[in-house]
Image (cartoon, coloured by chain):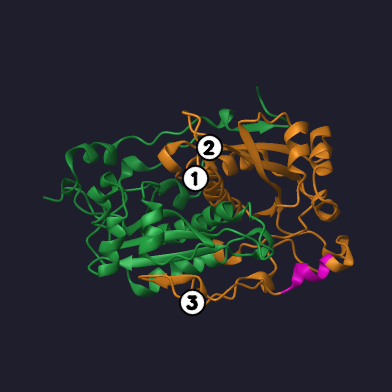
Chain colours: A green, B orange
Amino acid sequence: MNTEPDQIRLNKIADTEHEIFALLKQRYSPRIFKDKKIETEQLKQLFEAARWAASSNNLQPWRFIYTLKGSDAFNKAVSCLSDFNKSWASSAPVLMFAVYKKNLKDGRKNFHALHDLGLCLGNMTIQAQYLNIALHHMAGVDLEKAQNVFNVPKEYHISSAIAIGYYGGDIENLPEDLQKSETAERKRVPQEDLVFKNAWKK
Amino acid sequence: MNTEPDQIRLNKIADTEHEIFALLKQRYSPRIFKDKKIETEQLKQLFEAARWAASSNNLQPWRFIYTLKGSDAFNKAVSCLSDFNKSWASSAPVLMFAVYKKNLKDGRKNFHALHDLGLCLGNMTIQAQYLNIALHHMAGVDLEKAQNVFNVPKEYHISSAIAIGYYGGDIENLPEDLQKSETAERKRVPQEDLVFKNAWKK
């Protein structure tokens, strides 16, 4: 029985030290999604949001491979996830790989490529949140396997897999231990440990 | 004479292929800012937004050092910028360094640290945009010098400097060649070259 409405869980709203913009405050990384396909135009809006992010020298080193649940490609994507991530992410309507171009045109390493990929995913996250869509980033991926399975050229590097779906869904569909973490309080290091005025605080 | 209102330049609004959320559409990276201090509470809101981003294993590898125009620390920050960036960023009300913790607790490299720093700066960008504040990321920084000047421990790595200020300001205060780029059309690679369904497009 679904006792939760198909929306953001209220107890996941960030307990902030300072007020922040609503879409940021409500964002979290669920392991359960509404059983509903992502509309094609909304998927394009997610990528469009990413596309307009800033990047070092406007190099736009980000690339994306996405797969839709029910397709062979989706099953291949699932096969690249860690067992833990398989246990929940295989129910997401979309699985995506976030990829960056490693080098500059002159062959030197683009130090900021991975940073810029993260930055554009920040943009995508907000566009998603606006559409009641959640992104759950996964580091637990067999990157080498994914690189082969999806024919990613060696000049590019997969950074993560991302499960994408509308907020909602029946929490009882999750394995029991994950139900707990799904409703657990969100925690962060206090701002004073992260932010230093004028110089590093020892 | 200031012939532009103290707001986002309309010709900088992204010419998107698909509609995106207004704060993302209006965001750009100006080289001129309104001559106005950033309110302390708003600065805290920027960091707060960053703080609630997702990160790999919730490790929150991001750190920030900020300096306010008029202080010694600000002048030191300016001294770490490339000559090109000095020419405009020294007028910003805030200069910040974005820093990440390089390793995991067990001493292995945290591959996602730089990505997660970028991701949290995506959050910060949207909070800023909501407050009519712009971030301009700079790769042109003497990182080694900045690392020394600001006493950043060797376990941490500066990724970029960021100029922060309210949108607005008199474009005639910019060097002539920068006035051009300040009003130039924004360009991006088309979505079809970045986004691949099912597998990499050769």
On residue B61, which mark appears? Answer: 2
Residue A99 spot, x, y in % from top left = 48, 60
Residue toward you, B157 or B166: B157
User: Marks 1/2: CA distance?
Assistant: 9 Å
Q: Quadrant location of residue B97?
A: top right
> For the residue carrying disc 1, how many other residues have a C-alpha within 10 Å: few (<14), some (14-19), or many (20+)?
many
Q: Is residue A159 visible?
A: yes
User: Are both tags, 3 and 1, on one chain?
Assistant: yes
Q: Is residue B74 above or below residue B139?
A: above
Q: Secondary structure at mark 3?
A: helix
Say which chain tag 1 marks.
B
Residue found at the very far top of the displayed protein: A202
* Spot occupied by residue B26 in the image (x, y as percentages of width and height): 60, 65
- Whichever of callouts 3 and 1 sits on the residue coming sooner in the sequence is 1
Which dot marks residue A82?
Answer: none
Structural distance between the alpha carbons of marks 2 and 3: 33 Å
Q: Residue furthest left?
A: A1
Residue visible at 76% across and 55% down in the picture: B33
**Does the magenta-highlighted stretch encompass residue B180?**
yes
In the figure, residue A166 lies in which quadrant? bottom left
Where residue B112 is drawn, which disc sits there? Answer: 1
Disc 2 chain ID: B
Amino acid identity at mark 1: His
Q: Are marks 1 and 2 in contact (CB under 8 Å)?
A: yes
* Chain part drawn in magenta: B178-184
The residue type indicated by label 2 comes to Pro
Q: Amino acid at mark 3?
A: Glu
